[in-house]
Image (spheres, grey):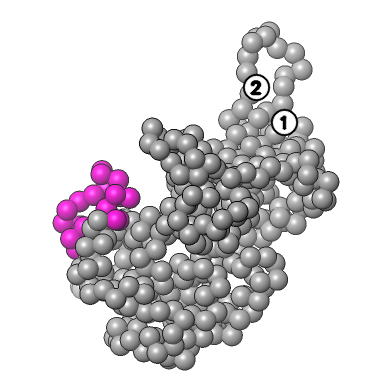
């Protein structure tokens, strides 16, 4: 009698290509996250990570840059010397100007080997279509390739639709991933469990039992090296129309039929369609925009927004937004929803407060409002 043990098919080698590979998003989020994936053996063995940038660097110069800049965004408890060294071995650097088609032939030479490819566009949305066109011209797109579009997608509805249409000329819809990296946070994932994994809150998760919902994402940092990008975007496009609305959708949506991405997306879409449109009178009454000025942050002197490098004189770009929204459906009728976000706030904080309605009578006269 003989037995055989089936083995899982090994994952195909992967080339992960990061446009904007030395930018703020790559340094603060992408490379630290990839290190964690490497640490937990969640990357195929032959995965290569190619960072692309306009700097004319050798690979060793990029690795030194990663050592200096990225290490500080990895928690000490997760940092293991041997894992870090083997992670650095995965890294490559390719000098590419995303607007120059000839540079993509240099990229093609670096990607020889037939691996599956993921192109992560951590760039301004104005570059998305040109990058996809240049990838196509250099023969770097096939049916196994994927493209990741980092938010924001355009600067308004028309530009977002145009980007989707133009990128769709080079990639099929199932090859395109539109990413809001904020949703990967553990606390955001846990919100789904809180809502749909127990019977305590769900019967009360509605009007009139909930008095208000408050969603706050505060940052203590300024715009830093992102000033050039940020001034054309502002807090509204950078945070409210993606991060905060995604959180609102998870708080407010109906239970999906499963955790399948399409099922969750369908319920989120219902929330967005139910948001009460704001008139100009609503905007004047229910929204606040602001801009941080010079002062102190964590005890250190801090520049005002208009004094930051690459910010034009007299810029009116907002670095703080607060607004009151409403959802026109039975579950959330007459429940105000407050959204707030800003840079150079007193403390870094991401918080969702569900304020439950007051008791009809309480013997605890000094008790605070019931909230979670």
The mark nearer the N terminus, 1 or 2, is 1
In the rendered image, residue 154 lying in the magenta stretch gets the answer: no
Q: Quadrant of residue 141?
A: bottom left
Asked if the residue under mark 2 is in contact with the one under mark 1, i.e. CB atoms within 8 Å, the reply is yes
The verdict on residue 82 being magenta is yes
Q: Quadrant of the N terminus?
A: bottom left
Image coords of residue 123 (percent x, y): 47, 68
Q: Is residue 91 above or below residue 304?
A: below
In the image, farthest residue toward the front? 313
* Residue 179 seen from this side: no
Q: Nearer the viewer, residue 146 or 136?
A: 136
Residue 334 or 345: which is nearer the viewer? 345
Residue at image mark 2: 369
What residue is at 54 percent from the left and 85 percent from the top?
170
In terms of depth relative to the viewer, which is nearer, 357 or 157? 157
In screen coordinates, is 46 left or right of 102? left
| Image spot of residue 276 (x, y percent) | 79, 50
x 58%, y 30%: residue: 372
Span highlighted in magenta in the image = 69-87
Label 2: how many Cα within 10 Å (few below 14, some 14–19, many 20+): few
Q: Hey, which quadrant is residue 225 in on the image?
A: bottom left
Q: Is residue 347 above or below residue 118?
A: above
What residue does disc 1 label? Answer: 211
Packing grade of label 1 (10 A; few <14, some 14-19, many >=20) is many
Give SS at disc 1: strand
């Amino acid at each position: 009698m003989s037995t055989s043990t089936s083995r899982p098919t090994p994952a195909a080698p992967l080339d992960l290509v990061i446009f904007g590979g030395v930018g703020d998003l790559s340094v603060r989020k992408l490379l630290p996250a990839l290190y964690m994936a490497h640490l937990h053996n969640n990357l195929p063995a032959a995965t290569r990570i190619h960072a692309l940038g306009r700097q004319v660097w050798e690979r060793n110069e990029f690795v030194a840059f990663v050592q200096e800049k990225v290490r500080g965004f990895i928690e000490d408890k997760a940092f293991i010397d041997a894992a870090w060294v083997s992670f650095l071995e995965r890294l490559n650097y390719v000098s590419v100007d995303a607007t120059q088609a000839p540079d993509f032939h240099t990229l093609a030479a670096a990607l020889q080997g037939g691996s599956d490819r993921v192109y992560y566009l951590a760039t301004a949305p104005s570059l998305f279509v040109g990058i996809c066109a240049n990838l196509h011209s250099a023969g770097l797109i096939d049916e196994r390739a994927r493209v990741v579009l980092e938010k924001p997608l355009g600067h308004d509805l028309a530009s977002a639709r145009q980007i989707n249409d133009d990128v769709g000329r080079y990639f099929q819809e199932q090859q395109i991933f539109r990413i809001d990296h904020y949703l990967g946070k553990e606390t955001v994932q846990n919100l789904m469990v809180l809502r749909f994994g127990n019977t305590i809150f769900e019967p009360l998760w509605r009007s009139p039992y909930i008095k208000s919902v408050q969603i706050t994402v505060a940052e203590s940092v300024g715009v830093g090296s992102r000033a050039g990008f940020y001034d054309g975007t502002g807090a509204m496009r950078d945070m409210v129309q993606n991060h905060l609305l995604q959180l609102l959708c998870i708080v407010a949506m109906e239970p999906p039929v499963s955790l399948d991405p399409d099922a969750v997306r369908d319920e989120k879409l219902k929330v967005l369609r139910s948001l009460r449109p704001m008139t100009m009178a609503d905007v004047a009454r229910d929204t606040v925009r602001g801009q941080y000025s010079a002062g102190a942050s964590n005890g250190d002197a801090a520049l005002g927004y208009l004094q930051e490098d690459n910010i034009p004189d007299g810029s009116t770009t907002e670095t703080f937004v607060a607004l009151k929204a409403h959802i026109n459906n039975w579950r959330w009728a007459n429940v105000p929803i407050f959204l707030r976000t800003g840079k150079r706030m007193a403390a870094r904080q991401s918080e969702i407060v569900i304020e439950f309605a007051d008791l009809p009578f309480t013997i605890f006269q000094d008790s605070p409002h019931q909230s979670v």
